[in-house]
Amino acid sequence: MRAISERDLAVVIPLLAAKIRDLTLELRASQARGGEASDDVVEDRMQIQEMLEQYDGILDSLRDEYEEGLKEGIQLPAFDDLVRPFQL
């Protein structure tokens, strides 16, 4: 038995993809500032990178579960259609 329905996943997946996009943009902006980075800035970047890795892993596992539901005939958008607006 699934812990979350495909319909719920169709809502959660774009939200997670948007968060990944936002964190990626934040990390890029931090790196673009350049210059000598303080310990706090380096720590923030490391935390963002760790969150991105975790969120990417969660998104991958949600993709597998979502696509299994689609194979069962549930009429929902394709996974790629859900995340496409948030890809950089």
Image (spheres, helix red, strand yellow):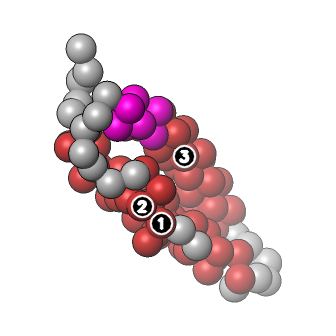
Q: Nearer the viewer, residue 31 or 54?
A: 54
Residue at which label 3 appears: 56
Whether residue 65 appears in magenta in the rendering, the answer is yes
Which segment is the magenta one? 63-71
Provide the major secondary structure of the magenta segment: helix
Rendered position, 9 above or below 86: above
Measured as percent of width and height from the top left, residue 81 is found at 42, 61
Residue drawn 63% across the image and 61% down it = 45
Residue 33, compared with residue 2, is above or below; it is: below
Foreground tag (3 vs 1): 1
> Which residue is rendered at x = 23% and y = 31% of the image?
4
Q: Nearer the viewer, mark 2 or mark 3?
A: 2
In depth, the one of 49 and 77 nearer the eye is 77
Report the side of 15 relative to 36 (left or right): left
Q: Which residue matches tag 2?
A: 81
Under circle 3, the secondary element is helix
